[in-house]
Amino acid sequence: MSDDSDQPTDRKESGQPVRLLHYADLESVYDHPERVGRLAGCIDDRRGDDALVLGSGDTTALCSLSFCSDDGRGVAREFFEAVRPDADTFGNHDLDHGPDWLADFAASTPPRWLCANVEDFPGDVAESEVFEVDGRRVGVVGLAHPDTASLSYAVDCAFEDPVAAAREAAAACRERGAEYVVICSHAGATDAEVARNVDADVILGGHDHERVTERVDGTLLVRRPAGAHLVEVELGGEPTVEDLDVAGAPVDESVADAYRARRDRLGLDEVVARLGEPLDRPSVAGFVTDAYREVAGADVGLAFEASVRRRLEGQVTTADVIGVAPFGSDLVELRVPGRDLREALLAGRTAVDDTHGRLVSGGATVRDETVFVGGERLESDREYDVAAMSYLSHADVLSAFARDRVVASHGPQHEALLAHARDGGLDVAREGRLRSR
């Protein structure tokens, strides 16, 4: 459907609208065969000659299947081959296994992979593409988060200012006769700044998982929570937005069967716990930090709020537990001076940034400006053992948890979660959490 011609055409004054079918942040959707089958079925049901299917990153398999399968993130391949998206861009988690892995995956999957603000990427990636859609020309630009190198293992790549990169790529699309310019962005909150400074009609966002439908200086900005969300945007006059009913869509049985077969082979349906009442995400976060603390034998367990991806209910399977924090990090133990730990915990009462959210703890409590660890007032001159994902020591978000403070590693962090769940750890107490009152 793409058109590489450099000859501009006149913008059409009339004609059929162009539809955009958009998804992003699929993450653990691949753990749920019927859900991913319905997403594929919904796309197939809605697409046509007047539609583009577009992703905005983190669309590879951040899920339990990827941890347990030899294919790793490549388990997303069945979905991509069935859906055949027109374009996608780089999410930070798509680069968790490094740029070489993503370059190979991008070269062997159907979307045109786009990213205007990446430098030194080892594979074939364009800044933009102009598509011919039912007689109308649509320019699509890809954008990654400016902090992708520190948020993932893409340290060999550089990520430029998304505003400047998008402005240049959008202008190039207009020069090639694009009637509409659409930006597929995994830049989160930066999207609003892009909208204010770039000649684009629509920004289809990812990375930040809140629901957004708004106009910013004339540009439509759309973003949805992580999961099987499909949005249809119609271009032609004033853009319109429709949330499609994926849960009620027909199932693409070939896709669903492919993921059922994977689950069966890997034993991911083993029940590790049964819950009488659902656990909301704050309670699940408590389970995570308790698991880290218990398995590592540490004073405090810590996790970023945004790292806890789901609630739990009913029969909890191996796949469910791994999907709570579906990251390939190890569980590490850090030795942290009390004064630095106190500063970090106080700072973590509010979001440390747009990406990570607040800190959640097991074993630490904040009351007013006083920090307690294990029920005792924190001592500034004492050292404390802190258990967390290795990512915490790599992210360079809070200086208290620098890499040189790591004193031990306790294996993959998801194994700690499974061990704690099997040991009754999902009976989560409310006390002992990091909180302010």
Image: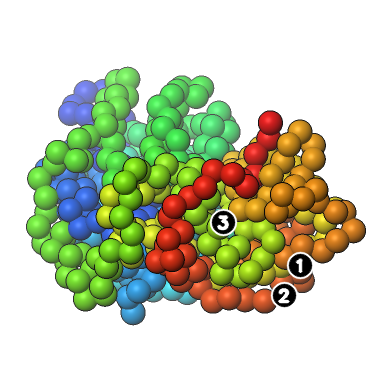
Write down the residue under mark 1: 335
Bin the neighbour count of mark 3 within 10 Å (Cα to Cα): few under 14, some 14-19, many 20 and up.
Answer: many
Write down the residue under mark 3: 289
Q: Gap in Å between the C-alphas at discs 3 and 2? A: 18 Å
Q: Marks 1 and 2: in contact by CB < 8 Å?
A: yes
The relative height of residue 214 versus residue 58 in the rendered view (above or below) is above
| Amino acid tagged 1 | Arg
Position in image of residue 15 (x %, y %): 18, 27
Q: Earlier in the sequence, mark 3 or mark 2?
A: 3
Picture residue at 33% right of the left edge, 50% below the top: 275
Q: Nearer the viewer, residue 249 or 379?
A: 379
The relative height of residue 38 versus residue 105 in the rendered view (above or below) is above
Bin the neighbour count of mark 2 within 10 Å (Cα to Cα): few under 14, some 14-19, many 20 and up.
Answer: few
As helix, strand or loop, the secondary structure at mark 2 comes to strand
Write down the residue under mark 2: 407
Q: Gap in Å between the C-alphas at discs 2 and 1? A: 7 Å
Position in image of residue 433 (x %, y %): 61, 45
As helix, strand or loop, the secondary structure at mark 3 comes to helix
Residue 16 numbered mark, or none: none
Q: Is residue 351 left or right of residue 68?
A: right
